[in-house]
Image (tube, rainbow, N blue to C red):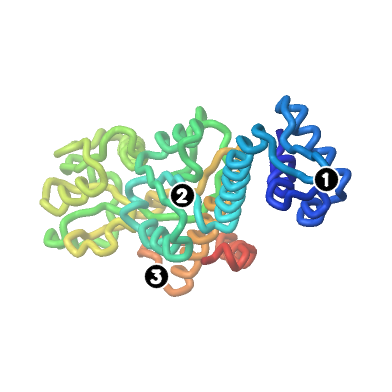
Amino acid sequence: MQLQQLAYFVAVAETRHFTQAAERMRVAQPSLSKQIKALETELGAPLFSRARGNVTLTPAGESLLPLARRMLADADTARQEVAELAGLRRGRVRLGATPSLCAGLLADALARFHREYPGIELLVEEGGSRDLVRALARGQLDLSVIIMPLQSDDPALVTEEILRENLVVASPSHARVRRQYLRIEDLRGRPMVMFRRGYDLREATLAACRQAGFEPRFAVEGGEMDAVLRFVEAGLGVAVVPSMVLDGRPGLTGIPLAPPGLRRTIALAHRKDVEPTRAAQAFRATLLFFLAEAEHGGELPQGVELIRGVRDSTRPARDAAPAADRG
């Protein structure tokens, strides 16, 4: 049974005339009659009585008519919903991001995207890069904003480096540390606030301390980003954090690490074997355009820079989206 056959059937039932039905459906009358006959054969019962040139519904036809109308209406609804999705009036983006990014630039980028695509549902999963990569591999996320480099056991991903950021030593503003730089060695013996296991920042800090020849001393460990920053404000210790998370936190001061310091690279990632949805592609374009605008206006947080090449790709990606896609 085909939708086209049902549409032909409804047209004949409503016009009670094969020729008029064919004209309504813009098809040759013999073709329409052939499709009606095929439908009757499949159902095993005649749908029309053609006695003396009058076309009337048989009992089987009477039973089929409301069902056929409903099926055609459902099919039309399905077409409309798919069309709305294709036009980015509906849909969803499942985005993964590290806590530091959620607390920093990402919130403003999400707000921009929501204004431009209010019908797109945003689902955000916060976690460490390893957890986000696993979620990508399981098909639970469309895109992730992760920290590079990836581990060797990560699945095949397409990654696009977008930002570089300095890591700084956060301390309470009232501590009034009068130093332009700190060395990793300066953290030896100092109480530190440490993130929970699985955080990229935990691994980066431990690796840097061990390379300098010492194990860090933890005053408290196991916190998420907000908790770590609050613990530092309370004077429990210092913490190595991304510079962007100190934006808007007057109670904290970030002291850069002496050159070469510690930096991290932020990238967008998606699975190599799955093309991102149109909604996910639109979010990527919105995010990159937002970052390029922020850089141009001098609004990127201190210590954060856009990677060369990203700014050049944002305008074409933005302009490539159809006007209907942008609201």
The amino acid type found where label 1 is placed reads: Gly
- Report the disc number at residue 53: 1
Residue found farthest to the front: 52
The answer to which of marks 2 and 1 sits earlier in the sequence is: 1
Q: Nearer the viewer, mark 2 or mark 1?
A: 1
Q: With respect to residue 34, does 105 lie above or below?
A: below
In the foreground, 206 or 73? 73
| Residue 212 visible in this rendered orientation of the protein | no
Residue tagged by mark 2? 265
Q: Nearer the viewer, mark 3 or mark 1?
A: 1
In the foreground, 312 or 9? 9
In the foreground, 95 or 303? 95
Residue at 37%, 45% in the rendered image: 98
The reply, left or right, for residue 297 in relation to residue 31 is left
Query: Within the image, what quadrant is residue 67 found in?
Result: top right
- The residue tagged with tag 1: helix, strand or loop? helix
Q: With respect to residue 253, does 237 lie above or below?
A: above
Q: With respect to residue 16, does 317 lie above or below?
A: below
